[in-house]
Amino acid sequence: MRRLPPLQALLAFDAAARLGSFTRAAQELSLTQSAISHQIQQIEAWTGQPLFRRIGRGVALTAAGVLYAQTVSTALATLADGRDRIEPYGNPDSVILVCAPQFASGWLMPRMRAFSQALPTTELWLVTGEEVNEIDRVDVDLVVSSKPIRTPDVICELLLEEEAIAVCGPETARRLRDTPVPEVLTHAPLLVHEGNPEWAPWLPDLKRGGLRTRRVLTVSDPRFVVAAAEQEAGIAMVSRLTAGDALASGRVVQLPQIPGFALEPLWLMRSTQPARSAAVDAVHAWMTGLCRP
């Protein structure tokens, strides 16, 4: 295995590179100047080339030193970021929830005030955009997903039934309110989510029967089709959850004449083992309490 330089020597190099002075680096790190000089010598011996040159009473990086300073700075920042990422594991009032961005934005964010009022000491850590196939209480406390984890060590509960609905901006809704299906689909362009390229499961049959529709936008994130609908760009077919906040605020309106369809439900999952902290039980109870009829 390739031997790495000691961390203290990297810290000395980083400080000297930033401050342009061994003396000031020693002051920052509470070391002597000779200790800094010795650690810089270690780094230069390890790299096999000089990294500093003397300028008056200070120092400047050589060309090799500039490149190495960038590497060291990035490495030290990564270590610091890593510490920040694991900070919640030391906080007994933290809860790590893995969920889809649509659940976070469409269900959780509109309820954050209620969350803070119900659980004022709890810190919620959201991990979005990742799928998990198992629950390790060291890394994950709760999971909300449309893909249930059916293993003996996971408790899987139905959280929310989901459906897709047709939405558009208020002006478009007023213009189309008296237009029946399927003609309504020819009076405004369609906003399409890549994950649902047919737009609706019944639309291909209508198109085979001669219905002509126009697509104006196709995106990978369904939140953007809602945003486009808000701008009166057309009709979006999205989950009620994704459109939830925009519906509640009136930024989009559901077109009732266009039939929706059922989507995969969302499941709330946790380990069968005792929770990492009482906060996990409290968040679990809060979520299930809001979703029960």
Image (cartoon, rainbow, N blue to C red):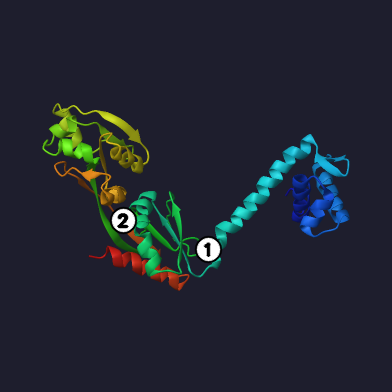
At label 1, counting other C-alpha atoms closer than 10 Å, the crowd grade (few under 14, some 14-19, many 20 or more) is: some
Q: Quadrant of residue 251?
A: top left
Residue at 81 percent across and 40 percent down: it is 60
Q: Is residue 274 visible?
A: no
Residue 120 in the image, given as x and y percentages of width and height: 43, 69
How far separated are the C-alphas under marks 1 and 2? 25 Å
Numbered circles on residues, count: 2
At label 2, counting other C-alpha atoms closer than 10 Å, the crowd grade (few under 14, some 14-19, many 20 or more) is: many
Q: Is residue 246 left or right of residue 125?
A: left
Question: 87 or 110: nearer the eye?
Answer: 110
Residue at 45 percent across and 67 percent down: it is 122
In the image, residue 242 above or below residue 195:
below
Q: Which mark is residue 88?
A: 1
Q: Is residue 17 visible?
A: yes
Q: Which mark is residue 254?
A: none
Residue 225 in the image, given as x and y percentages of width and height: 32, 39
Residue at 82 percent across and 47 percent down: it is 21
Residue 241 in the image, given as x and y percentages of width and height: 29, 51
Q: Earlier in the sequence, mark 1 or mark 2?
A: 1
Quadrant assignment for the C terminus: bottom left
Residue type at tag 1: Pro
In the image, residue 86 above or below residue 282:
above
Q: Secondary structure at mark 2?
A: strand
Q: Which residue is mark 2?
A: 266
Q: Quadrant of residue 156?
A: bottom left
In the image, residue 208 above or below residue 166:
above
In the image, residue 187 above or below residue 143:
above
Residue 1 in the image, given as x and y percentages of width and height: 72, 49
Residue at 29 percent across and 30 percent down: it is 216
Q: Secondary structure at mark 1?
A: helix
